[in-house]
């Protein structure tokens, strides 16, 4: 594979990570400050928002781990190690990270429903479902790629032993 293709994908991985980092640094602290103000005034909704923000920050950890694993996978492809156990391990880690993210957002979905009912914003529930669903799709895709790669490695090792 040409290095230009993997370079483009590496840039895409970096560009995917930048908006989430900006969200975690700039927007979420402002929302947290407003939620704390509401919570100190006796509004229980402020505590629900703080819990939701905690899950959002917590989900950033597996998100960046998955991006790092994708970056490593692209490096393996550059070094002609695409058909190796290292690539299988990277895909396995991406799968687990996506499952964790999906699980976190499924757990927090009832609280998103409470916020959406209070604020009369049904689109908020849809956003939570999209995040959970997209993460689940990524997990399934990584699992399929992992299985295919394991089969290819197995076939390659059998061919190497035959020669």
Image: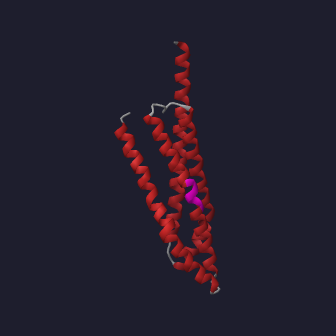
In the rendered view of the protein, which quadrant contains the N terminus?
top left
In the image, residue 114 lies in the stretch drawn in magenta: no
The single residue placed furthest to the bottom in the displayed view is: 41
Residue 32 in the image: above or below residue 162:
below
The magenta span reads 58-62
**Residue plotted at (55% across, 35% down):** 86
Is residue 126 in sight in this rendering?
no
Colour option used: secondary structure
In the image, residue 59 lies in the stretch drawn in magenta: yes
Q: Is the magenta stretch mostly helix, strand or loop?
A: helix
Residue 22 in the image: above or below residue 43:
above
Is residue 131 in sight in this rendering?
yes
Can you give x and y, in whole percent of width and height, for residue 89 in the image?
A: 58, 38
Total marks drawn? 0
Can you give x and y, in whole percent of width and height, for residue 141 in the image?
A: 51, 44
Can you give x and y, in whole percent of width and height, for residue 98 in the image?
A: 56, 51
Nearer-the-camera pick, 146 or 120: 146
**Residue plotted at (53% across, 23% down):** 155
Can you give x and y, in whole percent of width and height, for residue 95 in the image?
A: 57, 46
Rendering quarter of residue 19: bottom left
Rendering quarter of residue 162: top right
């Amino acid at each position: 594979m040409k290095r230009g293709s993997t370079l483009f994908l590496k840039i895409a991985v970096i560009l995917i990570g930048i908006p989430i980092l900006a969200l975690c640094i700039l927007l979420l602290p402002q929302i947290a400050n407003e939620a704390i103000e509401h919570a100190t005034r006796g509004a229980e909704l402020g505590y629900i928002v703080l819990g939701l923000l905690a899950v959002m920050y917590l989900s950033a950890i597996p998100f960046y781990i998955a991006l790092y694993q994708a970056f490593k996978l692209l490096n393996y492809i550059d070094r002609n190690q695409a058909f190796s156990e290292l690539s299988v391990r990277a895909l396995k880690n991406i799968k687990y990270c996506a499952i964790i993210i999906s699980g976190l957002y499924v757990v927090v979905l009832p609280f998103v429903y409470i916020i959406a009912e209070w604020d009369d914003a049904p689109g908020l529930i849809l956003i939570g479902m999209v995040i959970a669903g997209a993460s689940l799709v990524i997990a399934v895709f990584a699992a399929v790629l992992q299985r295919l790669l394991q089969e290819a490695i197995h076939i390659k090792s059998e061919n190497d032993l035959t020669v």
